[in-house]
Image (cartoon, grey):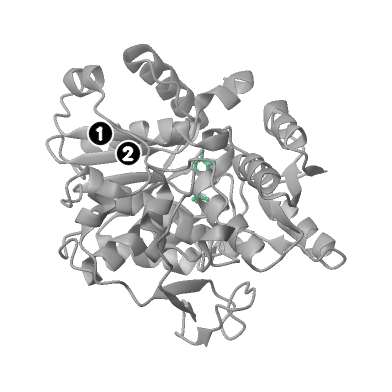
Amino acid sequence: MKVAQQHSTLARLVCSSCGNAFSIFEPQTFSSCCQQPLIAEYDLPRISPSVLQQRPSTMWRYAEMLPVLDPENIVSLGEGMTPVIYPKRLTEKFDLPFFHIKDESGNPTGSFKARGISAAVSKAKEFGFEGCIVPTAGNAGGALAAYCAAAGMKAVVVMPSHTPDVFKEECRLFGADLVLVDGLISDCARRVATLKQSLPFFDISTMKEPYRLEGKKTMGYEIAEQFNFDLPDVILYPTGGGTGLLGMWKAFDEMETMGWIGSKRPRMIAVQAANCQPIAERFAGNINSVKEYVGRASLAYGLAVPHPFAENMIMRVLHGSGGLPIAISDEAMIDAVKLIAREEGMLIAPEGAALWVALQQLIKEGLIRNDENILMLNTGSGYKYLQNL
Ligand SMILES: *Cc1c(COP(=O)(O)O)cnc(C)c1O
């Protein structure tokens, strides 16, 4: 099946700090001027959202606003257009009449990482790379391995050695080279930096290349479509490197420019693990930069990111949206995984379950009202975590 006929309107990459422009015609990492993430900008098309009705039911339905210049280079396994679920029993029991879960667990390889990796591997293919390399806490590695297999490319995945076997096995099954490192994802990132010197592969470290963000932003487009272009009041998102949070925010801005939505924005809640909460610590003013933060491992592997590279951008979204960060203990996450499984028949990832705990806490503190339009993003499947639940 052809995934998209429409052509990208990608125009330039800009430094997220000073706005300096960088070429879209060669591979880029982050900005050389400010050492900050590069952001893709488009000459956004004058189209109405009604064109979407005839589009494929994957994230590539937004092809004009995605960065792949030649549709032939798109590597797709059917990612995106995940359902928004109304969890009837939970909403009744907890008196949350307008509460929804966008369930990303049905994506290829069981997490929303598929979106970003589909975009980044497609760009790697477009640039003619032989392979890709990534440091990962777990889910990004499996996704990279799968999309590289589909692209006929090599994948090198660098993962903490304490990650459960299932995350390692899926990488091996998809034919990736797996490198295990004692430590957290930040230690894996250092290993990637060394390996890269002798390996001409596309490095897709979170926010250190511009295209995974573009894949993740499709969640924002889908949320708008699925909520009839009237965005929720509050969005809860489990924040590790922050790509999903930043991506949704970027999508909202692009849609406003195209006239698809107005200026109303959800309050963005960045949920972190108590064991690894650099953004919460910086927001509270306890540290000036996440680089000072020392994190510990969490069962929510996707949240064990002590030094998110895009920290400044994450802070801007939290402040700009009137949102905030909040940290949740591993024990509370496990209880919430079990509660949602029993009440709703959904086996969600601990990262997603953390949002439920955060919601209860913020309602108790009066920071969210239960009659607001609330959306939580379950970013992954709980099945890969069974060994540790
Ligand atoms: C990676 C991951 C996250 C965090 O995503 P970021 O884009 O790094 O903030 C959350 N949940 C799951 C299941 C993940 O795999």
Of the residues under marks 1 and 2, which one precedes in the sequence?
1
Q: Secondary structure at mark 1?
A: strand
How many residues crowd around disc 2 within 10 Å: few (fewer than 14), some, or many (20 or more)? many
* Three-letter amino acid code of the residue under disc 2: Met
Q: Can residue 307 be seen in this snapshot?
A: no
The residue at 70%/32% (across/down) is 170
Where residue 283 sits: x, y (%)?
Answer: 40, 60
Q: Are marks 1 and 2 in contact (CB under 8 Å)?
A: yes
From the viewer's perspective, tell me whether residue 377 is left or right of residue 370. Answer: right
The residue at 47%/55% (across/down) is 215
Could you tell me which quadrant the C terminus lies in?
Answer: top right
Q: Secondary structure at mark 2?
A: strand
Q: Which residue is mark 1?
A: 100
The residue at 49%/30% (across/down) is 349
Where residue 160 sits: x, y (%)?
Answer: 73, 42
Where residue 191 sits: x, y (%)?
Answer: 79, 57
Q: Is residue 19 above or below residue 71?
A: below
The residue at 62%/53% (across/down) is 294
Identify the residue at the far right of this view.
198
Q: Which mark is residue 376?
A: 2
Where residue 44 sits: x, y (%)?
Answer: 32, 73
Q: Is residue 135 above or below residue 48?
A: above
Q: Is residue 246 above or below residue 366?
A: below
Q: How many marks?
A: 2
* Three-letter amino acid code of the residue under disc 1: His
From the viewer's perspective, tell me whether residue 98 is left or right of residue 336. Answer: left
